[in-house]
Image (cartoon, coloured by chain):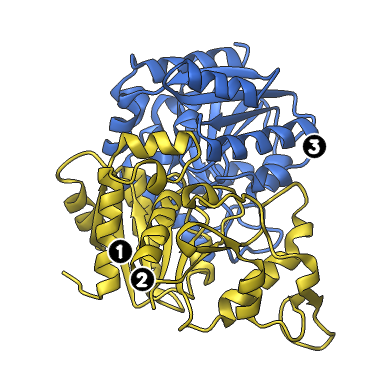
Chain colours: A blue, B yellow
Amino acid sequence: MKIAVVGKGGSGKTTTSAVIARVLARQGATVVALDGDTNPNLGLSLGLGVEETERLVGMRQALDAEEGEHASDWDSLLDVFGSDGPDGVRFAVVSQIDNPDPGCPCCGLSPEQLLGNVDPADVTVVADLEAGIGTLTRLGDNAVDIVVVVVEPVPKSMEVGTRAAAVAVEKGIKRLVIVANRVRDPDDLDAINAAFPGQEIVVVPDDGAIVEADRRGVAPLDMAPEAPAVQALSALAEQLVPV
Amino acid sequence: MLSVAFVGKGGAGKSALAGTFARLLARAAGPVLVIDSDPMPGLALSLGVPVTDAGIPDDATVERPEGEDGPRFKLRPGLSASEAVERYAAKGPDGVRLLQFGKLREHVGALMRSQHAFHQIREELPVDRWHLVGDLPGGTRQPFFGWTRFASTVLVVVEPSEKGILSARRLARLSEGEHPPDEILAVVNKARHDDDAARVESRTGLRVAATVPWDAAVADAERVGRAPVDAAPDSAAVQAVASLVDQLHSGERP
């Protein structure tokens, strides 16, 4: 099972990815979380802390500088570039680098190629993609099973979100979920419903707890598991993959 | 003339600040050309310009002759960068002009001409005609590909969150790049705590040129797709940007 999370920068992709990954792991799935953003911050939202997040990013940058260790396949990629996060989520940074070694399984593949190439048995992959729709437009058919589009009830965010949703539909992605994030009132929800007619929409309320968790650089799931936004994202995760 | 590029993590508020900055600079100091490098929409709304998708038309470009170095397309012979701006940059309030990279649609290939022309204009534009205000795509990638090269001042927009600070620390390394700007400054955006600026300064090593408070009026303007400078001219956030304009335009640094 492969899940890709997309949306405009700042819409809440990374927070959404982190909660989904950890809740699926708590349900018993073997979860690999991949950070495909070239400005990678998923480690923070998973709860790995600043230092470990930067260490993993640094290894990716070392490859770019033509230093550091490469990996020969998917398993060793997770060994070399991965880290064990809370709830047993295995986490790795796989963002595109500027000086790839063509054909190398660890750095010669863009995130979209990596997602297309691997389909590890009995593993759930949660991929936080680069802001915007670039990676999504380049995904091959059947590269992912579920696309989660995170969107705020703001024109700029909905513009990116509707384009992402259109691409997912065009690609015949099996399941498309719209996460309506930072919803404050019925008007916000009306705006989202109007922009995504007929789509599966999950409402996540505007919640100061997420802002505070971001400020501290900790996982919302650790800091405020009972907060309404965290509850809404947890509920989404629970019904995303059949246990 | 000022040349300022706004960079930062996606969602930090680059477009809202760049749009507000450009409008206020135009009122204070004359002709402003806004160069929107982001293939995602947004800046036109924050600027109050009633266009959302105005690339450079195909007939402004020609295919580069074989054997000539450079990208595949270039401005057609006889069309200078300045003339291209006069013709193709959208007109906005306060006399601002907006030159767009071309918005990402389904087929990236259709934009190639516009984007090559855009980069050429940015490279060749005379430096004494316009104040330049640039808005880059979110993240760290494009700034390191020379997309800020036109700017002598790079403003890193930072939300005072750990993700924002990590992103700003990465962008601070532009000073070690091939074409470092004269100065890289931080602008703290959506500040909610008294110590936010001090935190950003100590963690990123960047001087904080301005602290823009979290402001519900700006958030409301964004929700309805209006320019903060039109929807909330007296808000604390817009006032903070006005101070930043004064500071950069006067050339005085604290």
Q: Nearer the viewer, mark 3 or mark 2?
A: 2
Residue B2 appears in view: yes
Disc 3, SS: loop
Q: Nearer the viewer, mark 1 or mark 2?
A: 2
Q: Amino acid at mark 1?
A: Val
Residue labelled with disc 1:
B245
Disc 1, SS: helix
Cα–Cα span, label 3 and label 2? 52 Å
Residue labelled with disc 2:
B29
Q: Nearer the viewer, mark 3 or mark 1?
A: 1
Q: Chain of mark 3?
A: A
> Could you say which is closer to the camera, residue B33 or residue A60?
B33
Q: Chain of mark 2?
A: B
- Residue B186, percent from left and from top: 30, 59
Among all residues in the image, which is located at the extreme right?
Answer: B66
Q: Residues within 10 Å of mark 2 (few under 14, many from 20)?
A: some
Q: Identify the image quadrant of the C terminus of chain A.
A: top right
- For residue B50, above or below residue A212: below
Which mark is on residue A141?
A: 3
For residue A33, side relative to residue B81 (left or right) = left
- For residue A72, above or below residue B119: above
Please state the total of marks drawn on the protein image.
Answer: 3
Q: Amino acid at mark 2?
A: Ala
- Residue A147, percent from left and from top: 65, 30
Cα–Cα span, label 3 and label 1? 48 Å
Q: Residue A137 is drawn in which quadrant? A: top right
Disc 2, SS: helix
Identify the residue at image location x=43%, y=17%.
Answer: A185
Q: Amino acid at mark 3?
A: Asp
Q: Say whether marks 1 and 2 touch (CB < 8 Å).
A: yes
